[in-house]
Image (tube, helix red, strand yellow):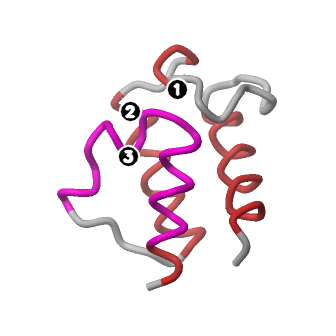
Amino acid sequence: MERSEITEKVRKNVGALLNSPTDFPETDLLSAHGLDSLTSVQLTLYLEDEFGVLFEDDELGIENFATLESIVGLLDKKVAE
């Protein structure tokens, strides 16, 4: 799967979860758009299901879910495994 395809899928779902437009910059902190612990869990479950991956405990840190770019980077690695 191409990185651009991953980005668009993640962008659409994050936008839907946050009731936010999907045109925010990839480097914006998602917490500024309303990402909290509940939506983080929902997002994690969606990503695992949509991309057929399982996140290890050490991958669930805020550094991997802080921005759209960091989520896509993590998924890009996981999908390639």
Around disc 3, counting alpha carbons within 10 Å, would you say few (fewer than 14), some (14 to 19), or many (20 or more)? some
Q: Label 1: which residue?
A: 30
Q: Are marks 1 and 2 in contact (CB under 8 Å)?
A: no
* Mark 3 residue type: Asn
Which mark sits nearer the N-terminus, 1 or 3? 1
Q: Label 2: which residue?
A: 38
Nearest the viewer among 2 and 33 is: 2
Look at the magenta stretch and give its main secondary structure. Answer: helix
Q: Callout 1: helix, strand or loop?
A: helix
Residue 49's place in the image compared with 33, above or below, is below
Which mark sits nearer the N-terminus, 1 or 2? 1
Q: Label 3: which residue?
A: 64
Classify residue 16 by image quadrant.
top right
Which mark sits nearer the N-terminus, 3 or 2? 2
User: Residue at point 51% right, 82% down?
Assistant: 80
Q: Which residues are magenta?
A: 57-77
Q: Callout 3: helix, strand or loop?
A: helix
Residue 15, position in %: x, y?
A: 70, 34
| Real-space Cα separation, disc 3 to disc 2, in angstroms | 16 Å
Nearest the viewer among 10 and 80 is: 80
